[in-house]
Amino acid sequence: MTGADLANRGYLQALKFGAQFTAPVSVASIVQDDSGVHVVSFCTGQKVRTRTVLIATGASYQRLPLDACERFEGMGVYYSATSVEARLCRESTAVVVGGGNSAGQAAMFLSQHAADVRLLLRGNDLRKGMSSYLADRIEKQSNIEVMCHTELCEMAGDKHLERVEIRNNQTEEREMLDCPSAFIFVGAKPHTEWLPDSVALDDRGFVMTGPMIHHHEKLPEGRTPCELETTSPGVFACGDVRSGTTKRCAFAVGDGALAITCVHQYLQ
Ligand SMILES: Cc1cc2nc3c(=O)[nH]c(=O)nc-3n(C[C@H](O)[C@H](O)[C@H](O)COP(=O)(O)OP(=O)(O)OC[C@H]3O[C@@H](n4cnc5c(N)ncnc54)[C@H](O)[C@@H]3O)c2cc1C
């Protein structure tokens, strides 16, 4: 079955259960009126009044500014490092791009599977964007090489990634590596710019929910939000857009299913 067939079946099933779709449309704003009802405005000017809203607008992962990056996505270029990707780089060199905790965790995890891991940093300080405990572990791991002032500048291969070229941004020295997998952790931008101020975001712009907002100043007094509820009562978030989630399909689907339980509880 193709992805389009699967999506079509999901669409038909939702129609069968009474869901109404409006597409293509983007949501421009949510405003809560005096009666507590949320008014959701679409870019078309259409408005929907509703007691609950579920935000599932995801995030955009930053790609490297290389034409080949998109071509090799899923074929050697990955944006997460789980046991699935780890199997694919067994006994070969894995390149990890990024200087944050997600890059560091990926490098540590992949070092258990790959022959060696090259961690590429644009700057020269591993601890600038990474927790020091993680930086310590990376430095002690014999098969991780931290390459400072280094950027990935070319990708090559037939159908699958086979080689990458790296460049020292100070000396301009270049090196070609045989490498079937490159893991990119250069940031994600959540689609939350349209949300009202009443929905609290973390310092990276992801929507905060549940226990992490129990004492948040934006939460109305006396209210204990459920797991997926935001600081705005009746507004929920799930999937990639939610702070602290694992950015994977299965997680997003599970989060979505749980969110519907939360919505039902709220409406009761
Ligand atoms: C290149 C790439 C490869 C990946 N590979 C894998 C993989 O192999 N396995 C895996 O498990 N995960 C993978 N992921 C991660 C996976 O795609 C996400 O975790 C998952 O899609 C998150 O689902 P979501 O519903 O939260 O968000 P999304 O799937 O991002 O859906 C969000 C939707 O909301 C829409 N939207 C945004 N803003 C608005 C707005 N204002 N109004 C209306 N609609 C809006 C967007 O257009 C989009 O359709 C990959 C991600 C990328 C980028």
Image (cartoon, grey):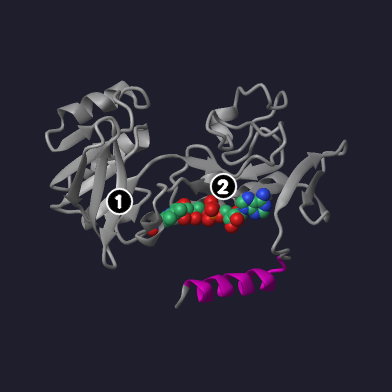
Residue 150 in the image: x percent, y percent? 28, 35
Residue 15 in the image: x percent, y percent? 68, 71
Q: Is residue 257 visible?
A: no
Residue 23 in the image: x percent, y percent? 70, 64
Between 242 and 85, the one nearer to me in the picture: 85
Q: Residues in magenta?
A: 3-19
Residue type indicated by callout 2: Cys
- The quadrant in which residue 37 appears is top right
Q: Residue 5 lies in magenta, yes or no?
A: yes
- The quadrant in which residue 29 appears is top right
Of all residues, the one furthest to the right in this rendering is 34
Residue type indicated by callout 1: Glu
At mark 1, the secondary structure is strand
Q: Which residue is mark 1?
A: 154
The secondary structure that most of the magenta stretch takes on is: helix
Residue 52 in the image: x percent, y percent? 73, 47
Q: Is residue 142 visible?
A: yes
